[in-house]
Every structure is written in C-alpha cells, then in structure tokens.
Amino acid sequence: MDLTQLQTAVAHTWKDSIIDRLTEYVRIPNKSPDFDPEWERHGYMERAVTLMADWCRAQALPGAEVRVQRLPGRTPLLLVDIPGERAGSVLLYGHLDKQPEFTGWLPGLGPWEPVIRDGKLYGRGAADDGYAVFSSVTAIAALKAQRVPLPRCVVLIEACEESGSSDLPAHLAALGDWIGEPSLVVCLDAECGNYEQVWCTTSLRGNLIGTLRVRILTEGVHSGMATGIAPTAFRILEQLLGRIESPVTGDLLLDELHVPVPADRQRQASAAARVLGAGVAGRLPWASGAHAVSDDPTELIINNTWRATLAVTGAEGLPPIGSAGNVLLPELACKISLRLPPTCDPRRATQAVREALEREPPYGATVSFEADPATGGWNAPPFAPWLEEAISAASRTVFGREAVHIGCGGTIPFMGMLGERFPKTQFFITGVLGPQANAHGPNEFLHLGYAQKLTTCVSLVLEAHARTLS
C-alpha cells in the first residue's frame, strides 16, 4: 500500500464531495425522535438518510449494496454492504440523528446554517455524527482503489442514537444473522482530547434519564399569604435531589451508583492526564472566574469516565422571570440525567434512585419519579496486540504522536449491545469531539483537518486488521 496515494485519495474525497454533502446535511433539522415526535411527518430524517445513501452509491465501491431498512413507526437504518476479498467482516458504526437547537450560538452561527470558519464546519450534527458515514466509506474506498484485500465491510448508520437507540433492537432483530460476527468494530462517535493524535475510547458511561415531579398545592397562591405555612415545591425538589447528590461536592450518595475503577483504566487516565494537563478542564467554555471541581486532571478524567454524575437538564412549572409574580407555585418538575459508570447495573441503579426520591415525601407532598429505560455503559475487552499496535502506528504515521487511550463520559448504546452479542470482537472507538467542539450545545463544529486525518487512520487500522486474516 502506498501511504502517499492513500492520503491523497482521502484528501481529495473530503475536498471534492464530503464537505459539500456535510454542509447540506447541517441544513437538515433531523432531530432525534425524543426531540421531534413528529419526525416522520416532517420528513427531515428521510432527507438526511437519502442524502447519505445517494452519496454512498456514488462512491467507487464495486459490488457494494446500499440500502435503507425501514420498519413501521421506526426511524430508518442505512446499511452499506461492501464485499471483501478475505474471510471475516468488519462493522463500522455511526448515526445521523441530531440533538435539538439549544441556545447561545455566537453571532453569525446557528444550528441549521452551516458556516466554515478557521477550518471548522459549524452547525448541528456534522461532528455528532454526520461525518461518520462519509469517513467510514472513504477509508474503505481509498484501500479498494489500491486493491488492498479486505474482509467484508458493513457500514451501519442508525437514526435514533440521540434517543437512546430505542429503534435499533428492532432493526437488529429484522436483520437476523445478516451482519454476521465481525472480528472488528469501528465506531466514529466518540471524543478526542485534542486534535493532535488518535484518541481511542476504552469505556463508555451509561445513562439514566427521568422526570422528578413535586406537587404541594392544587393551585398557585399569593406568596405573602402562603409562605411560612406551605413549603415551596422548589425547596422540596432541593431536598429530594440532596438524597442522591451532595450539593457541595457533587458526589453521588447511593451505593448502587458506584463501581470500582479497574487498575488499567486508572493507569490510562493518568497517562491521558499527562498529555492533556490543564486541557482536561480547559476544553470547556468557562464563565469568567469559574473553575473545575478539582485541580487534578487525573481526578477530573476519572470523574468524567468512571464515576456517576447528575445534571438537571430541564424544568417545568417555573415561569419566565418577566412573568414571575409573587406566587407560591403549586407544582414543579425537573428532568435529571444521571451518567452511570461503565459497569454499573442500570436496572439496579434505576430502582435505587426511584426509591430514594419517592420514599417518605417531605411534608406529605405528591412526589413521583418517571424514568426512561436506562442505558448501560460499556467497558472494552482487552485489545489484541495487533489492534493496539495498529492504532499506535496509525497515530504515529499520520500525526507524528502516540495514540492515547481514555474512557468517554458519554453513552453509545450500540456498543453495549454489540459487546453482549459479540464478546470476542475487537473495538476501535474514536471520534472528533474535541476541545470546544461542543456537541449537543451551541457552536458545535467539526474540525475538518482532524476528521480527514482520522479517516486515513481508519484506513490504516483496516489494512492492519486485514493482514491478520491472511
């Protein structure tokens, strides 16, 4: 294989077609079903999957089959089946659904209006995770152009990941044994600590989302008449949340939310901290004067990857400040998101959280906690020697720096599904969500130069995997 030819082919594809298609993809508000229950009627998901399928069909992949699997009431599944010259198979994964708009976009930027600035494509979804299908197919096509013998490659792009991949089990059931048992899974939906080397994800946290609701009165009452007699719903919410999280340290208080940190993950976190240093906290858009919960970058990485955390992500019942009269509010609700350690039992965690929140309601208030089905985390199996060396060699070749192994604070439900289904499979999970890329928030961007180089790295890992099959 000619490395220069490979890099040139990848660069040309990115320049000549991928950036244009990603720009059009950003314009499509194909929000995940949790954020757009009318997604099917709106047709945005159909536009997005058609854009990607059409591009895949136009690539130089002899014998490839590109199809969109559709099930009643389910989001579509894009599949690209590329026949190989060697035995075995590789599965490459990504998703095409998006998070909602969010607020706080800088002047001139917005979720559905793509802008390229300083080598970055701004807009919702390009980095999370629209680029994945383009990068995956390009990595394969660049090898095919040099007649590098590969196993069968299956690219799977779902449209429900941001809603917990709730449609994916039905699609997998419909596929039956069609996917086969891949010896390697490549996932391009993870984080990177910087844009200067390959970052390999070794674990993912689970996610428990639910709505906590408190009702103390049947209607709002003049605050001058009611306070001092009736407790506020807000104070009751505070007390309930204080049962599962320390308001001072942020530590989670339930035993069911904790797991021991494996020694190898502790060592990897320390190594990653030495690379990133202050950049662990520096990647976030801090308000003036604000700082992280710790000055120790290793501790911050462990917090973000192997410890449970709680965030309140939404609320109901609080009027806007401009409409807030002197009224004691009758009912409040908040949506909470608990990130669970990779090996935490999500069902046991859900039960423990519900019991803690609903037992002995303060002041006899009506309290309920309605949880969505929790998603478990994932801890990667040990790397085969060939894979560890292939990832390191790819990083050295393309970036001139060693690869870094680190856990990810987010959740990719499909990885847990695959881990259970294929316990002997090797995983290469990486991505472009680096400093300030801000997936899910305002000013999300795709670092175009990094994405292009990462595509080349995927090619090199695929080629190294193919050599193990000879």
Image (cartoon, helix red, strand yellow):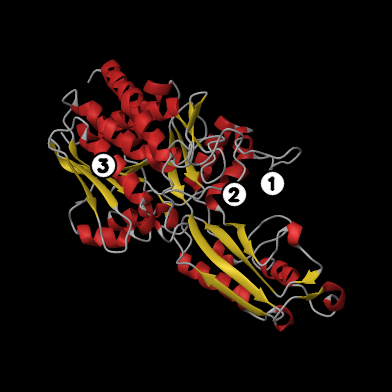
Q: Quadrant of the C terminus?
A: top left
Kindly indicate whether the residue at mark 2 contacts the one at mark 1 (C-beta within 8 angstroms): yes
Residue at x-position 28% and y-position 31%? 138
Badge count: 3
Reading the chain from its start, which is encountered first: label 3 or label 2?
A: 3
Which residue, given by chain and number where applicable, does mark 1 sit on?
293
Q: Earlier in the sequence, mark 3 or mark 1?
A: 3
Helix or strand or loop: what does disc 3 sit on?
Answer: helix
Give the distance between the C-alpha atoms of the residues marked 1 and 2, in whole angstroms.
10 Å
Name the residue type under label 2. Asn
Name, please, the residue furthest toward the bottom: 364
The reply to whether residue 402 is visible in this rendering is no
Are the two marked residues, 3 and 2, in contact with CB atoms closer than 8 angstroms?
Answer: no
Q: Position of residue 431 (x, y in %)?
A: 42, 38
Report the residue marked by disc 3.
Answer: 53
Looking at the picture, which amino acid does disc 3 mark?
Ala
Q: Residues within 10 Å of mark 2 (few under 14, many from 20)?
A: some
Name the side, left or right, on which 11 lies relative to 355: left
Residue beneath the point at 51% across and 56% down: 341
Q: What is the spatial separation of the Cα atoms under label 3 and label 1, in whole angstroms?
A: 44 Å
Residue 267 in the image, given as x and y percentages of width and height: 52, 41
Looking at the image, tell me whether mark 1 or mark 2 is earlier in sequence order: 1
What kind of element bears circle 2? Answer: helix
Q: Name the amino acid type tagged 1.
A: Val
Q: Residue at x 39, y 40 (%)?
A: 130
- As displayed, is residue 68 above or below residue 356? above
Instruction: Please identify, in this view, whether the residue under mark 3 or under mark 1 is nearer the observer.
Output: 3
| Closer to us: 459 or 335 | 335
* Quarter of the image where one finds residue 383: top left
Q: Which residue is mark 2?
A: 303
